[in-house]
Amino acid sequence: MLALHGLTKSLPGGRVLFSGLNLTIAPGEFVAVMGESGVGKSTLLNVIAGLDTADSGEVLIAGTALSGLDDDGRTLLRRDRIGFVFQAFHVLPHLSLARNVALPLVLAHADPARALERATTLLDEVGLAGRGGDYPRQLSGGELQRVAIARALVHRPALILADEPTGNLDPETADRIMGLLTAQARQAGAAALIVTHSEKAAAAADRVLSLTHDGLVTHGR
Amino acid sequence: MAADAARPSVAALSWLILGEWRSQPMRVITAALAIAVGVALGFAVHLINASALDEFSRAISTVNGDADLQVQAVSNAGFDEALYPRLARAPGVATASPVIQLTGVVEGQSDGLTLIGLDIFRAAAVTPNLLGRPTAADGQAGFGDAGAVFDENAVFLSPALMAGRAPGQKISLSAGGRTTRLTIAGSLPGVAEGRRIAVMDIAAAQWRFGQIGRLQRIDLKLAEGADRDRTRAAVAALLPAEAELVTRESQTRRSDSLSRAYRVNLNMLALMALLTGGFLVFSAQSLSVARRRAQFALLRVLGSNRRALMSQVLIEGGVVGAVGAGLGLGLGLLLAGAALRLLGGDLGGGYFQGGQPALVFAPVAAGVFFVLGLGCALVGSLAPAGEAARAQPAVALKNAGDAVDPSARPRILPALILLLLGGACAFAPAIGGLPLLGYVSMALLLAGGVAAMPWLARALLSPLQARSIRSPAAELAVRRLWGAPSQAAVALCGIVASTSLMIAMAVMVSSFRGSVDDWLGQVLPDDLYLRYEGPSEAGGLDPAAQARLAAVPGVAAIHFTRAQPLRLNPDAPPVALVAQPVTRDDPGARLPMIGKPRPPPPGLTPVWVSEPAAWLNHLKVGEVIRLPLKGGTKVFVAGVWRDYARQNGALVLTSEDYTRLTGDALRAEASVDLEPGADLDQVSAGLKAALPPELADRTRFARPGQIRGIALGLFDRSFAITYVLELVAILVGLAGVAATVSAQTLARTKEFGMLRHIGVRKRQITAMLAMEGALLGAVGVAAGLTLGLIMSQVLIHVVNPQSFHWTMQTRLPWGLFAIVTAALIAASAGTALLSGRRALSVDAVRAVREDW
């Protein structure tokens, strides 16, 4: 589902973040990437999502090479094939929970009524049944992250990217959120790549890798 | 297909836009109102003028009928009637209708009327609207009364004059210096409501009103198939200097030029208000985009492309513009209706006399103003939309707060270029008689001034920033504004635009009023003034009456004057030909001369021309010109004098020269020097007793102070709309301050939460915000005042001379400056304080956890 071939990325000052990265994630597989602060975990996610560009190498998502796409093409790929979960939730404050979740579908020109129906189903699945009409201000951090997970899954993406999804949550809520994310991704058959500092969060993954200056290595090796 | 997929989703756009508006309604309402105000003012001014011009042109066509060509006298003295048979025989002319046309007055009334003498057989083909319907004394129209149309005592009255009168009644009419008692023979059913027209037989009119052998007009109908241009040339070749050929087009141009400059100026000022609205939209949209930086980044991650984000911001601006423009059109209609009722068709400017015009809706103008309002809002949204589309999602999602970079140096070059271009345009000449480049100059100066705000804000705050400030609140306030001058500039651009526009207008009006006040002091040197109320052309004091007045005890000297219209150009309104008691050696004794007058060469008649007359007719001191009097008299331009009373210009002759050249010995006004110790009331009573009885009740006496008061009252009335525009500019400015400061403050909830966490008290934060607001207001006022003063110089030295052809000296309204400064700083500080309190009402812990 996701393949990285010889991916290299440097910062504007010349410091190399990672070089010659290779990685393959199969459909339904859950991979966690750990590493020290500043090593380039978030940048790796941004490069995979087409929000940033690599100096060299190739990213393939469901067989589509990012390097062959322009900005619009990468945007469409993100819209149709990728789901995102962020550390800071990033839920639009002026939209109801249902509309927040339905937004990726509506952006892809889905019928708004059907999109809202699907959003309501997903909100039920993440434990927010009956809250579709509420607004984000009324929710706790854990609840907001559930909304973000529902939004990441609503359009049945092939790949889920999560950047420190439990970073803003207490340990108990973090456990529940990771359980939910893993279960939902597996149920949807989506490949998932999360970057995290948390050993506990990473433990939920099928594979745990560390991003170091030498590349991606199996964690703990 | 891919392009279709990349197209922004309408449903998503509507969710996002409506959601944003629900959460920030005041921001949207303020921006829409700013646009509405500009559109309303522009549209109202246009409607009022269109209505007045429509009324004016209908009035002209009632009197002029269906003539293909018209020969008109250049002055009220008319021309020799011998021209009539020559024109009737001219090749291509089918019918020629001779006309006597005088300005008259009904005894006991001061409102003027148009007295027309017609040859009924000729007029039937050209001006059928002016044919009277004979009516018997019992009110019945009848064939038996038809002979009344040739009766030398008969007069037919339009409905407006007939009100309160009946056929068979006697009426005293004064015109051409004669008063005659006539019998009302019937009505003029073809004349519209509100027009004051009296029609009688041409021969009777010539005899009764001293016009024997003279005509004021000949209407010509061309033969079928006649070559219009050839006929025109043939007719023109037959005309004496006292007559000119006019066409429907030239009359339209003449009526249009009456108020053109005034109209264009008001429209331009309204457009400047609209421009201010555009700046407020820019300000509101920029703040909104800055606040939603992370939201836009998220949308990019979720699959919105750059075009979709740009569309979202542009649609937001477009809808604000459309709602504002729609609202503005409605407000403009209401405003125009109210202004027509309260101020008349010339908004108190004194250009159109007569009935009150009905409001005429102008769909094309409505469309134009709608597009202008929409365009302003879209242009104001363009830069913020670009900013939204350029946002780097990865960076913005990591840094949800404002991206302040104090090390970034504000750019000044684009602002300097705009300011220099603005300065250059101020030196450009008028286009088509209008100061269009003067307004372009003002718009460029405004844009340059606003563009310079980040640099200026930093420059003004640098001395404060460099010092160590003891109060933490003041320290934070100064460093925040110094470090984020671009954000300060966004908040300031609306304030600066509205303040500078308002200051420019206020300085111009104050300078104009001060100059008029000084001028009144110069032109009113005597102790007492007499004025014949009603149209001066209708009559006045004959030499015998003048002598009687001069002999009244207590009168040391009495100076008589008279003004008559004289047309120098068929396309332009007439100038005033004025008889003044000036002497050839010392014209400056009674005229406020500009520059040194020149003595006339022997044998030449001197004429002193007013500033507008010199400008409009390209007259220079020392030049010899030919006036259309007595077959074309050569006169010497002996000097230019300041005159604010007659926008179309005035030519002054000595009293003797005036009588000699026009044959008119009547005088309509007089000024009196009293003997030392003479009692003003006694002298007034003596003068009144010495007046001819028919003039006594229409002659008014006034002291210089009273005339000055009336004149300045008229000035204030004619600038009433300008004062309204000033007030609106202040209100728009204050609303802009409130909206932008409030939005910026509320966007900093997280920062306040952090400050509370590190031990800053609520009171200190509110003090910091009040100080920031006050500093912001002070910087805005400093920039607005400076820019306003520069723009006022363009208004005073470019726009006014090019529009109205008179000059003035700058007077600064210090009191207004103080009020504006205090109001803007107080509004800015007060709004920051209030919105700060609101922002601080959020729990500090929650504030730092806020997602956005």
Image: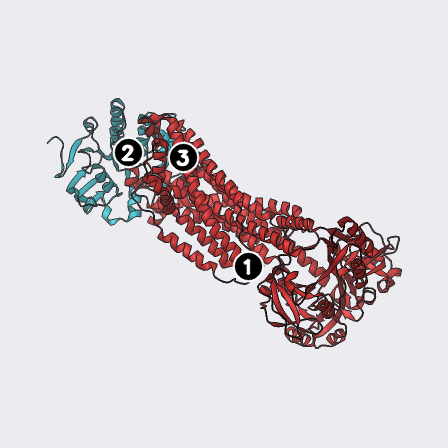
Chain colours: A cyan, B red
Q: Is residue B843 above or below residue A106?
A: above
Q: Nearer the viewer, mark 3 or mark 2?
A: 3
Residue type, label 1: Pro
Q: What residue lies at 69% left-to-right and 51% top-to-bottom?
A: B704
**Residue at mark 3: chain:** B
Cα distance, mark 3 to mark 1? 43 Å
| Residue that numbered label 1 is attached to | B801
Query: Is residue B800 found left or right of B707 in the rendered image?
Result: left
Image mark for residue B396: none
Q: Nearer the viewer, mark 2 or mark 1?
A: 1
Residue type, label 2: Val
**Residue at mark 2: chain:** A
Query: Is residue B326 found left or right of B582 in the rendered image?
Result: left
| Residue that numbered label 3 is attached to | B771
Residue type, label 3: Met
| Residue that numbered label 2 is attached to | A85
Q: Estimate the x, y position of residue B801 in percent, counting from the top left.
A: 55, 59
Q: Estimate the x, y position of residue B334 in percent, counting from the top left.
A: 61, 44
Residue nearest the observer in this picture, B258 or B135? B258
- Looking at the image, tell me whether mark 3 or mark 1 is earlier in sequence order: 3
Same chain for labels 3 and 2? Say yes or no: no
Q: Is residue B821 above or below residue B835?
A: below
Does dot 3 land on a helix, a strand or a loop?
A: helix
How many numbered discs?
Answer: 3
* Badge 3: residue crowd in 10 Å (few <14, some 14–19, many ≥20): many
Q: Do residues under tags 2 and 1 come within 8 Å of each other at their CB atoms?
A: no
